[in-house]
Image: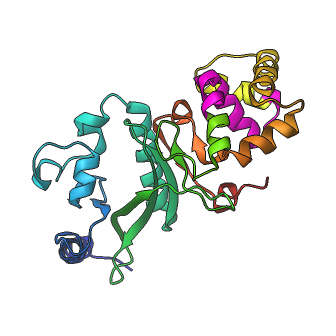
Amino acid sequence: MNVDLTVNNAEDQIYLEQYISAFKLLYGTNAYIGISYIKDKNFNYCAASQQFIQLLDVVGEEGKLIGKGDYQIPALQSYVSMVNTIRKQDIQICAERKAQKFLYITPDKYAYIAQKYPIINPHTNNVIGVHGQLSKFVSPHPLKYLSRLADSADCVPPLTADENEQIAAINKHLTERKHMILYLSIQRYSYSEVAEILTELGYKISKERVNDHLNALKYIFVVTSKDELINKAIAFNYHCCIPRKLLQVGSYLLDDDLLISEH
């Protein structure tokens, strides 16, 4: 059976235009504010919300973005590896014809959950683009605290005056590296795993040095064991604060099971 590709392409274009019109009705007013975009089958932008345009630091109106791919966005040109990853993800979504969820760490070190869907024309069954929606990352920790950057003034929920004094004393001695090791230790990573993770992120360190830092952390927190350290750190809400240095620019596939802390 021969298929008239010209007819299919015309129908796909009409459906995409209708999809874009609906998108603009939804995101083009102040009644609905969100971070969202549409790419065509060549992964060029066809529509975007104002918040998404601001996120990409595109100067001017939507027209500055339309027709361009991620490789042509000035704010992303210093992050070729990340753009390559995003392109591979877009291709995979279209090939597998199913939605997927990703963790985006932006160049300004903010974390977003990106849900990306293939746009499928129901009349031709062709994949004609990608619809992406972003939202600020919220920690899946059972206590449901917001995961905030370490330098945020409201990083930790309210504690007693005495506890706040203890935290202030701790923070005076909590270097960036110690904070990263503390956060990973709270997630129950071993000495060697902490060393591997930090080395992968560009902070070369041996498991022996990780052990040295943990001993220093025990002294800072006034505890005698690793378990006591973790328990006290959680009591002081350090599990809610992602160290800024751990937020590396990139896009990472998320599995819902991986988001849930087992400890």
Residue 205 in magenta stretch: no
Residue occupying image coordinates x 80% and y 44%: 231
In terms of depth relative to the viewer, which is nearer, 44 or 162?
162
Q: Position of residue 236 (x, y in %)?
A: 68, 45
Q: Position of residue 191 (x, y in %)?
A: 81, 28
Magenta span of residues: 168-192
In terms of depth relative to the viewer, which is nearer, 156 or 24?
156
Q: Quadrant of residue 238?
A: top right
Secondary structure mostly seen in magenta is helix
In terms of depth relative to the viewer, which is nearer, 9 or 33?
33
Residue 175 in magenta stretch: yes
Q: Is residue 247 above or below residue 154?
A: above
Residue occupying image coordinates x 25% and y 56%: 51
Q: Is residue 74 above or below residue 12?
A: above
114 sits left or right of 75 in the view: right
Residue occupying image coordinates x 27% and y 67%: 33
Across the whole image, how many numbered discs are drawn on residues? 0
Q: Position of residue 34 (x, y in %)?
A: 31, 64
Q: Is residue 188 visible?
A: no
